[in-house]
Image: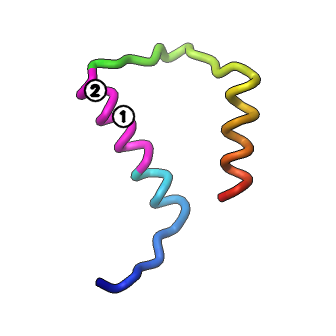
């Protein structure tokens, strides 16, 4: 199998699709007005900085 270049945008879209599908299957719902805590925001930013 050969390696293929996948853009960051395509990876992000794939992750979002997968996460939403998983939540639907497990009947988990995140309210539309949900706001992440400051600690979680910092964690997510640290992950994005590594990418």
Task: Based on the picture, tell me whether residue 17 belongs to the magenta stretch.
Answer: yes
Above or below residue 8? Residue 46 is: above
Q: Residues within 10 Å of mark 2 (few under 14, many from 20)?
A: few
Residue 1 lies left or right of residue 32; in this view the side is: left
Q: Secondary structure at mark 1?
A: helix
Residue 50 lies left or right of residue 24; in this view the side is: right
Q: Residue at x 43, y 43 (%)?
A: 16
Which secondary structure class fits the magenta region best? Answer: helix
Above or below residue 19? Residue 35 is: above
Q: Residue at x 47, y 14 (%)?
A: 31
| Quadrant of residue 29 within the rendered picture | top left
Query: What's the magenta region?
Result: 15-26
| Quadrant of residue 25 within the rendered picture | top left
Check disc 1 and report the residue beneath it: 20
Contact, mark 1 vs mark 2 (Cβ under 8 Å): yes
Check disc 2 and report the residue beneath it: 24
Q: Nearer the viewer, residue 15 or 39?
A: 39
Above or below residue 44? Residue 34 is: above
Residue 33 lies left or right of residue 6; in this view the side is: right
Q: Residue at x 70, y 56 (%)?
A: 50
x, y (%) of residue 26? 27, 23
Alpha-carbon distance for marks 1 and 2?
6 Å
x, y (%) of residue 36? 64, 21
Colouring rule applied to residues: rainbow
Residue 47 lies left or right of residue 1; in this view the side is: right
Q: Residue at x 43, y 47 (%)?
A: 15
- Quadrant in the picture for the N terminus: bottom left
| Quadrant of residue 23 within the rendered picture | top left
- Quadrant in the picture for the C terminus: bottom right
x, y (%) of residue 30? 45, 18
x, y (%) of residue 35? 63, 18
């Amino acid at each position: 199998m050969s390696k293929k270049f996948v853009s960051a945008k395509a990876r992000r879209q794939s992750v979002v699709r997968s996460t939403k599908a998983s939540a639907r299957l497990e009947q988990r719902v995140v309210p539309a007005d949900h706001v992440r805590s400051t600690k979680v925001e910092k964690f997510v930013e640290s992950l994005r900085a590594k990418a």
